Amino acid sequence: MARLESFEKLVSLSKRRGFVFQSSEIYGGINACYDYGPLGVELKRNVKQAWWNAMTREHDNIVGLDAAILMHPKVWEASGHVGGFTDPLVDCKKCKTRFREDNLPEANMASKECPDCGGELTDSRQFNLMFKTQMGAVEDTASTIYLRPETAQGIFVNFPNVVDTSRQQIPFGIAQIGKAFRNEITPGNFIFRTREFEQMEMQFFVNPDDADEWFETWMERRKAFYDTIGINPDNLRFHEHGPDELAHYARAAFDVEYKFPIGWSELEGIHNRADFDLKQHAEFSGKNMSYRDPQTNQVYTPFIIETSAGCDRTTLAVMCEAYEEETLEDGSVRTVMHFHPKLAPIKVAILPLVKKGGLKELATEIKDSLKRHFNVFYDEKGAIGRRYRRMDEAGTPYCVTIDFDTLEDKAVTVRDRDSMDQIRVPIAELQAWLSERILIS
Ligand code: GAP
């Protein structure tokens, strides 16, 4: 199967079928912000659900959290974001394009010439990526707060609350999915790097003596996760951070990278954050962030193993992995999204061959009986071949066709998206037949 060579075709399919739209498109769009359409929202929800199940439902010692986006400004001082969450920025005085200095070719940095128009570049300055806003009604007295640039800090500051209320003992984790905001200097590549995005983060609190072992465990678990959502292991790799690459808070780090059409790029970061975060918050808040082991009475500040995945990037990887332009025996080409059934936005399409002769009524009955179990799409318009093609582009694993034989034999034709094979399934067995194939883990 040929791999997707650029995002262009995916962007066009996304617009055509309703996966992803440019935000505020009727006003010309807003840079690096995207909206998920009817198919995209289902796909992204399924990605989040798969992650949530893998991280919480499958582990007795991981609980969930949904912290507020707006947090006390001191959080971002303690975390180091106010002082250090910056990228070096240079502007072109002529064409006004902004560049991250570390992305500029060396020759342009030396000559101070814009690579786009040859204009003069400004000196580099540090640019903080956090979005600022004001909390309070009167601007003069209102305090400056930030849209969170990561969900992690909401977890760290709630560590004592979760210990006090959840009966969890170390080792245990807290998982959260939520929006994050970064005023990226060079966003782009469709939904790969945006200014508003969603993260799926899990912070695992461990005894410092066990941190290295848990770091390895979480790397293996995260690797296994991508397999369960249909990512080919050949398109995944783990990149270990060298001493120069490590973030200020990290003792060890791996990036999970996916082979996107733009090349190997980060999907998720796995970090051993040591006791940096809890100690910082203890210092800045004056509160006790340590842990007393109920068995040994040992008191210590836990180390944290973090798994931090981008939801939009995972969704993008899933779309890249699924995309195929398949040449059929008759020479025609069909575009098909081979989503894992668990992630497919629509699970089953109900397609009466024609509207007349009682087929519409029977098809509606079947649709109503299935919709309690799956996301079902009903379509009665157009040639059946065209309807199949639409569902191939939506990535619908099964199309159920109701024809005149159905009235006699009480069976339907089920078409498999990937093989395009068709078989007859009795209506009485249809829901069980589909469940067996769609709800596989
Ligand atoms: N708490 C650690 C943390 O936030 P990060 O590497 O900065 O680490 C984690 O971000 C993940 O969030 C990345 O691997 C990526 O998938 C996603 N992410 C980060 N910035 C993003 C952006 N501008 N657009 C889309 N996803 C982004």
Image: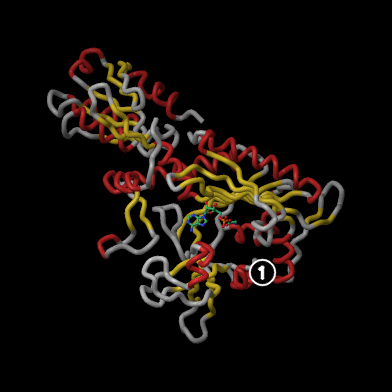
Where the N terminus falls, by quadrant? top left
Residue topped by disc 1: 78
Decide if residue 70 is on the left or right side of residue 191.
right
**Can I make out residue 372 in this image?**
no
Q: Nearer the viewer, residue 12 or 218?
A: 12
Q: Nearer the viewer, residue 336 or 109?
A: 109
Work out which residue is located at the far bottom of the displayed protein and give it.
Answer: 140
Quadrant for residue 196, please give it.
bottom left
Q: Nearer the viewer, residue 100 or 383?
A: 100
**Can I make out residue 393 in this image?**
yes
Q: Is mark 1 within 8 Å of ligand 1?
A: no
Q: Secondary structure at mark 1?
A: helix
Where is residue 66? Give x, y as percent. Answer: 55, 55
What residue do we see at 37% from left, 37% from top? Answer: 323
Where is residue 250? Give x, y as percent. Answer: 69, 56
What residue do we see at 36% from left, 30% from top? Answer: 397
Decide if residue 326 is on the left or right side of residue 266.
left
Where is residue 38? Give x, y as percent. Answer: 32, 46
Where is residue 193? Give x, y as percent. Answer: 46, 56
Q: Amino acid at mark 1?
A: Ala
Relative vertical location of residue 55 with respect to residue 389 in this rendering, above or below: below
Relative vertical location of residue 132 with respect to residue 20 in this rendering, above or below: below
Work out which residue is located at the far top of the displayed protein and give it.
Answer: 409
Work out which residue is located at the far left of the displayed protein and give it.
Answer: 356
Q: Nearer the viewer, residue 291 or 115?
A: 115
Q: Label 1: few (<14), some or many (≥20) within 10 Å? A: many
Decide if residue 282 is on the left or right side of residue 425.
right
